[in-house]
Image (cartoon, rainbow, N blue to C red):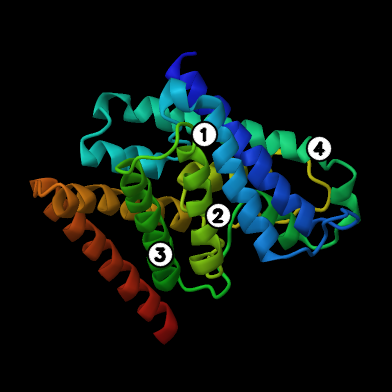
Amino acid sequence: MNPYLAELVGTAILIIFGGGVCANVNLKKSFAYQSGWIVISFGWGLGVAMAAYAVGKYSGAHLNPALTVGLAFNGDFPWSKVAGYILAQMVGAMIGAAVVFFHFLPHWKETDDPGAKLGVFSTGPAIPNYFANLISEMIGTFVLVLGVLTIGANKFTDGLNPFIVGMLIVAIGVSLGGTTGYAINPARDLGPRIAHFLLPIAGKGPSNWGYAWVPVAGPLLGGSLGGVFYRAVFKNDWTPAFWCVLLTCLLVLLIVWMIENKKKRA
């Protein structure tokens, strides 16, 4: 299988499981309605594992632009393939979201809350604060990329790595995910959000585009920092990219902090 097609298929599988568990929990008259955060965290973790098992040998199963960029900064992935991988991941995420829409077709009318419907497709903050939300997404994705790289440095029984990475997703969800819904993946959030905007979902509300940049920028920054951090600290390879990424993260956080404080004073 072509690696770009593999990323598309793998990301679609990820969203079918991940968006599917959100739909199960959020949409009325589902037998899993209101079954809670633990169910959602395990659904996403197992979804990552299943997608990785499906396409890992063809593309490495990045399934996430932040991981692709983090691996490129770590020197494990060629920059020439980054754009193609990200495009494939975005398209796959939109396809996966469309599958979830059709699977739960009669449940959209039964659910009154537009926010619950949007929550099937994309994330949102528990407490809206761009500065804090951005930090949460950066930390979660930093942990993800660092975790993937450290897991890869260990020897496991053949075929166990995807499952361990899936458990990493569960760990991030149950420990860090309650602040923003832990997108930790720009394709996971933006692709389904576009699908939410385009699909004829009964009673849907706005797609919350004002927040949409946070689960894109936060994971890309955090993933990049995870990649250069691992390369510098674990491999003792202090490249100029480390300082560039670190300064970029600090600069973006400073700008967002100033904007957030200006909003509070207004």
What residue does disc 4 label? 103
Residue 141's quadrant in the figure?
bottom left
Amino acid type, residue under disc 2 in the picture = Trp
Q: Earlier in the sequence, mark 2 or mark 4?
A: 4
Disc 2 and disc 4 in contact, CB within 8 angstroms: no
Whole-angstrom CA distance, mark 2 to mark 1, is 30 Å
> Which residue is located at x 19 percent, y 58 percent?
246
Disc 3 and disc 1 in contact, CB within 8 angstroms: no
What residue does disc 1 label? 52
What residue does disc 2 label? 209
What residue does disc 3 label? 134
Amino acid type, residue under disc 1 in the picture = Ala
> Which residue is located at x 64 percent, y 31 percent?
95
Q: Position of residue 241 (x, y in %)?
A: 14, 47
Q: Which residue lies furthest to the front in this view?
A: 157
Quadrant position of the C terminus in the picture:
bottom left
Q: Position of residue 84 (x, y in %)?
A: 39, 25
Camera-side mark, 1 or 4: 1
Whole-angstrom CA distance, mark 2 to mark 3, is 15 Å
Amino acid type, residue under disc 4 in the picture = His
From the viewer's perspective, tell me whether residue 211 is left or right of residue 144.
right
